Image: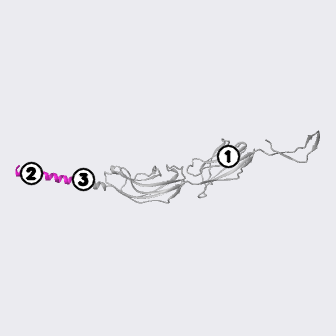
Amino acid sequence: MSFYKLIKKHNVKRKKLVLIILFILLSIAFIGKSSKALESEIIYLQTDKELYYTDESIQLEVSWMLDYLEQENASFQIRFFDTLDNLIWNSSEYREKGTFEQNWTIKIEYLNLNFTNFSNTIYIKACVFNEGNEEYMTPIVLATKFITINKRNICCELSNFTDKLTLGKNLSLNARFYSEDTNLSLSGRDIIVTIISDHSTIYEHNYTLNSYGLISLKLSSMEDMVLGINYLVFNISNMFIYNRSIFSFEILVEKTHVYVDIIKYRKDRMVRKLKHRTLFLLS
């Protein structure tokens, strides 16, 4: 091989080596740039308190920073999860670049939450998504905060109530419903009132609590009840968020006592006058 050809071959190899090295450097730079393309930070994630009741609202304040390349498709979102990692609430998606602050008022009653348990733990997560990068298809959790939500204990208080009633008499009473924790009255709630005897429903009517948490009832012992044991039942309709929502009271309906005077009776064909009075109960 001539000296000229040898030099030429060497130059070709050198150019290939230079191109390979340049390609590697550019690839490393591109990878480094891609990995640093998405920048996000949670500045604060806070609620007004850590223990709530089901009839309250959560005051949530969040501040975050988001920055990404034009070819990226990133977004920020707040998500609520229960203990089984089920999504029960989420905010809108925020795609704007920069630093932002946002406040939310979330009514607990409207959360997609299972209220069968007395107490629930909620996890609040600040998440970032990047649909333009497969590496970030799984959300990045910037911060997590948990809160506790308890059911309220509800009480039912009756006034002018009696547990014994003579057949033919009426019963007029008031029923008040209030929170045991705060003594505040329930208002505007629907109440189903039923009277049950021997597993049969004799009376059923819907009421709505007034601003004092009261409903007034006038019940007839003959039309709304039966002779014997009756159960007056109050059910707070659709209020699964309260720890106790059904209240039952027993009412005994009796016949009227009748007094009979015996003026005289015949025995051994003799008539004797009685000076005493005997009490009989009509069966």
Q: Which is more N-terminal, label 1 or label 2?
A: 2
What residue is rendered at 9% in x and 51% in y? 8
The x, y position of residue 113, in whole percent, is 50, 50
What residue is rendered at 72% in x and 48% in y? 171
> Dot 2 surroundings within 10 Å: few (below 14), some, or many (20 or more)?
few
The x, y position of residue 106, in whole percent, is 49, 54
Q: Which mark is residue 27?
A: 3
Q: Which mark is residue 213?
A: none
Residue 194 shown left or right of residue 114 in the figure: right
- Residue 203 in magenta? no
Give the labeled residue for mark 1.
231
- Residue 20 in magenta? yes
Q: Quadrant of the C terminus?
A: top right
> Gap between marks 2 and 3, in whole Å?
29 Å
Q: Nearer the viewer, residue 43 or 162?
A: 162
Magenta residues: mostly which secondary structure? Answer: helix
Give the labeled residue for mark 2.
8
Q: Amino acid at mark 1?
A: Tyr
